Image (cartoon, grey):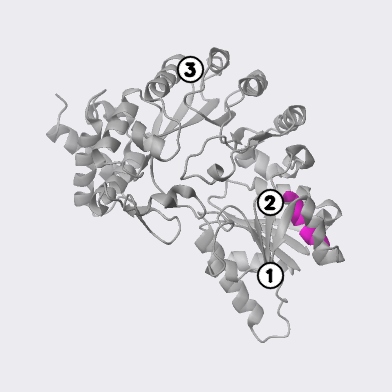
């Protein structure tokens, strides 16, 4: 049993939480009195409740994200029902502490916030330790002034130098190492001001000490880690630092191991290109955020945009490296029309990244994208994941069509199950968007859904469509 339970609901079982491990690693002597519990989104609620109750915690700290908001609320409601039941053998209710990006900017009257005794906004490693010292030993909360500010039950953490934070990679278990994706971070923050992103609220970039970080990575390699995913928002911001990290992995990585970076598409100087060319096939995965190729839309949301340079970088990655490249577009940005979104899609298809990931704009709590609601008629779902429903330039029906397009694109193109049909389904260039839109709408009409479709049935439908709609 543990007096402090650090818990979260991960999107999938293979995604362990680095955040929980960082909290535990920075608890000092209290770390021995803590335990990490990780659940999966699809795991039965009863299993989550039973695991927490079995620990009989004095403090339950939950890390909340957009994907687990409603699942966390359901978990807390189930626990409250248990704790409030009139039975002598029941476990007493612990102190509830919430943290994570999703809860940080919710209002005081949000149902999730109302169920908490304390809420931590921002990076919690040091302020959470101070709060635990207060709860367990009576240490005065004014010690928080070094690392944050208290406002009633809210603790607002200051960004701190990252050399003050103890690393947590040693807390990945052998099961994590052997069977899961390992999250790592070499820096925090982003200098850009993309208004749909929480990183736009603090544009300072801080880095972990490089020597210590690489030593930690060496330790993970020695333990047999195979999949490394960097959480850095702008890995290639500092060319020299990025080059050193890339060379470190290049010298050690062999298939089936791989490393995943998120990179800024306009920042690929020759020194980085020379290294990227050398990674063996399957060992390098890159996420490149395009979001839109429409310059006025990009400027409107504070996003740097250079379509020609970005396309050239994607062509380089396609033609001169073995990288698996995921490029993102977002539908529903303020002022974006169906026609301009289609142009962006066609431009992106022309340079053929490995995957085109189509997202729908979300209004995350606290992000400045909300300032466009009135001027651009932005209507969002008030429930997580807060997706846009319509705008002044993109109707609800048009957005629904794009969402259906995105779902079938994921099933047919991104997942790679129908690669042998792609040359018959889609042209190398031109108006690919309109052709696939027509296909996706016919598939929806045929199956009545865009999920849970038998693969053999989908293949049959695609082959029929290819025969009836041959490419010129």
| Element on which disc 3 rests | loop
For marks 2 and 1, give the one nearer the viewer.
2
Estimate the spatial distance between the alpha carbons at disc 2 and disc 3, rounded to whole Å. 35 Å
Label annotation for residue 321: 3
Tell me the distance, in whole angstroms, between the alpha carbons under discs 1 and 3.
51 Å
Q: Quadrant of residue 274?
A: top right
Coordinates of residue 427 in the picture (x, y in percent): 23, 25
Q: Quadrant of the C terminus?
A: top left
Q: In this view, does 370 lie to the left or right of 277?
A: left
Task: Select label 1 or label 3 by which is in front.
Answer: 3
Return the x and y of residue 469 as percentages of the image width and height.
Answer: 14, 33
Instruction: Mark yes or no: residue 460 visible.
Output: no
Foreground pick, 352 / 182: 352
- Write the start and end of the magenta stretch as one range: 125-133
Q: Using the image, determine if residue 361 lies above or below residue 230.
A: below
Sequence-wise, the earlier of marks 2 and 3 is 2
Q: In the image shown, does 408 or 139 lie closer to the viewer?
A: 139
Mark 2 crowdedness (10 Å alpha carbons): few <14, some 14-19, many ≥20: many
- Mark 1 Cα shell of 10 Å, populated few (<14), some (14-19), many (≥20): some
Q: Name the residue beneath numbered marker 2.
A: 20
Q: From mark 2 to mark 1, how far is it between C-alphas?
A: 19 Å
Identify the residue under disc 1: 53
């Amino acid at each position: 049993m543990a007096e402090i339970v650090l818990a979260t609901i991960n999107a999938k079982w293979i995604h362990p939480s680095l955040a929980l491990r960082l909290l535990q690693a920075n608890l000092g002597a209290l770390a021995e009195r803590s335990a990490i519990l990780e659940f999966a989104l699809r795991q039965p609620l009863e299993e989550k409740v039973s695991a927490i109750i079995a620990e009989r915690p004095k403090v339950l700290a939950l890390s909340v994200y957009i994907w687990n908001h409603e699942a966390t609320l359901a978990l807390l409601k189930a626990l409250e029902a248990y704790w409030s039941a009139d039975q002598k053998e029941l476990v007493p209710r612990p102190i509830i502490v919430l943290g994570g990006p999703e809860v940080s900017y919710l209002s005081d009257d949000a149902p999730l916030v109302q169920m908490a005794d304390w809420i931590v906004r921002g990076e919690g490693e040091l302020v959470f330790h101070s709060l635990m010292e207060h709860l367990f030993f009576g240490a005065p909360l004014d010690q928080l002034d070094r690392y944050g500010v208290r406002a009633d039950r809210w603790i607002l953490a200051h960004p701190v130098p990252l050399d003050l934070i103890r690393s947590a990679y040693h807390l990945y278990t052998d099961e994590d190492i052997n069977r899961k994706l390992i999250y790592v971070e070499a820096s925090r923050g982003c200098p850009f001001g993309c208004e749909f992103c929480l990183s736009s609220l603090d544009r300072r970039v801080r880095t972990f000490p490089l020597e210590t970080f690489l030593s930690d990575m060496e330790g993970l390699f020695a333990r047999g880690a195979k999949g490394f995913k960097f959480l850095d928002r702008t890995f290639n911001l500092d060319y020299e630092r990025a080059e050193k990290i890339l060379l470190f992995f290049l010298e050690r990585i062999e298939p089936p191991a791989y490393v995943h970076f998120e990179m800024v598409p306009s920042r690929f100087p020759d020194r980085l290109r020379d290294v990227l060319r050398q990674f063996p096939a399957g060992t390098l995965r890159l996420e490149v955020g395009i979001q839109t190729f429409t310059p006025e839309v990009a400027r409107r949301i504070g996003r740097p945009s250079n379509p020609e340079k970005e396309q050239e970088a994607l062509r380089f990655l396609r033609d001169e490296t073995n990288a698996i490249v995921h490029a993102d577009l977002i539908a529903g940005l303020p002022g974006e029309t169906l026609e301009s979104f289609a142009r962006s899609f066609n431009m992106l298809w022309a340079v053929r990244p490995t995957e085109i990931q189509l997202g729908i704009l979300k209004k995350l709590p606290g992000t400045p994208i909300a300032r466009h609601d009135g001027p651009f008629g932005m209507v969002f779902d008030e429930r997580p994941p807060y997706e846009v429903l319509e705008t002044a330039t993109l109707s609800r029906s048009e957005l629904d069509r794009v969402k259906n397009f995105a779902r079938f694109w994921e099933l047919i193109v991104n997942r790679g199950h129908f690669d042998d049909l792609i040359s018959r389904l889609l042209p190398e260039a031109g108006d690919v968007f309109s052709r696939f839109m027509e296909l996706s709408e016919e598939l929806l009409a045929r199956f009545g859904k865009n999920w849970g479709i038998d693969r053999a049935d989908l293949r049959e439908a695609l082959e029929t469509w290819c025969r009836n709609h041959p490419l010129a």
